[in-house]
Amino acid sequence: MNIIDDLNPCLPESWQFQPPREGGNGSIHQPGQYPNIIWQSRSRLPTAWETSLIASLEILFEQGIDELPTLVEALNQQRSFDSRGLPWTTASFQAFLQVNGH
């Protein structure tokens, strides 16, 4: 894929992107003047670790596992640990979601 299809170059460099409460200044959306980029909310490609975690979560969700303690336990059983290679705790997974789960 070319870079315009993989990420949105107009997004600010921030992990804590907060959309404005009111309409923006048109730097991302202005009808007829900007392409509708499929992945408009990401400013970079996911890392291999992020892609692996997403795949693990999709499998667990398909199995009906969606309660936080059970989800954390299942991730650890699959050895799908945090980015430092440490087992998840409910607190560490919640902290991860605060930054990455928007």
Image (cartoon, grey):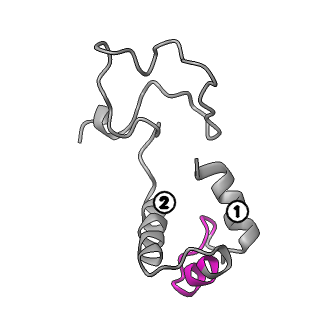
Q: Is residue 8 above or below residue 73?
A: above
Q: What is the C-alpha distance between the residues marked 2 and 1?
A: 15 Å
* Residue that extends furthest to the bottom in the rendered view of this protein: 77
Q: Amino acid at mark 1?
A: Gln
Q: Is residue 63 above or below residue 33?
A: below
Q: Which residue is mark 1?
A: 94
In-front residue for pair 3/92: 92
Is 97 situated left or right of 64 in this image? right
Q: Are marks 2 and 1 in contact (CB under 8 Å)?
A: no
Residue neighbourhood size for the residue with mark 2, other residues' Cα within 10 Å, grouped as few (<14), some (14–19), many (≥20):
some
Q: Under tag 2, what secondary structure?
A: helix
Is 89 situated left or right of 27 in this image? right
Earlier sequence position, callout 2 versus callout 1:
2
Is residue 82 part of the magenta span, yes or no? yes
Q: Quadrant of residue 88?
A: bottom right
Is residue 18 part of the magenta span, yes or no? no
Q: Position of residue 87 (x, y in %)?
A: 66, 78
Q: Under tag 1, what secondary structure?
A: helix
Residue at the (37%, 40%) spot, across then down? 39
Q: Amino acid at mark 2?
A: Glu
Residue neighbourhood size for the residue with mark 1, other residues' Cα within 10 Å, grouped as few (<14), some (14–19), many (≥20):
some
Q: Position of residue 53 (x, y in %)?
A: 49, 67
Q: Position of residue 47 (x, y in %)?
A: 45, 55
Q: Which residue is mark 2?
A: 50
* Residue that extends furthest to the left in the rendered view of this protein: 1
Q: Is residue 30 above or below residue 88?
A: above
Q: Quadrant of residue 20?
A: top right
Q: Which residues are magenta?
A: 71-84
Q: Position of residue 92 (x, y in %)?
A: 72, 66
Residue at the (63%, 33%) spot, across then down? 18
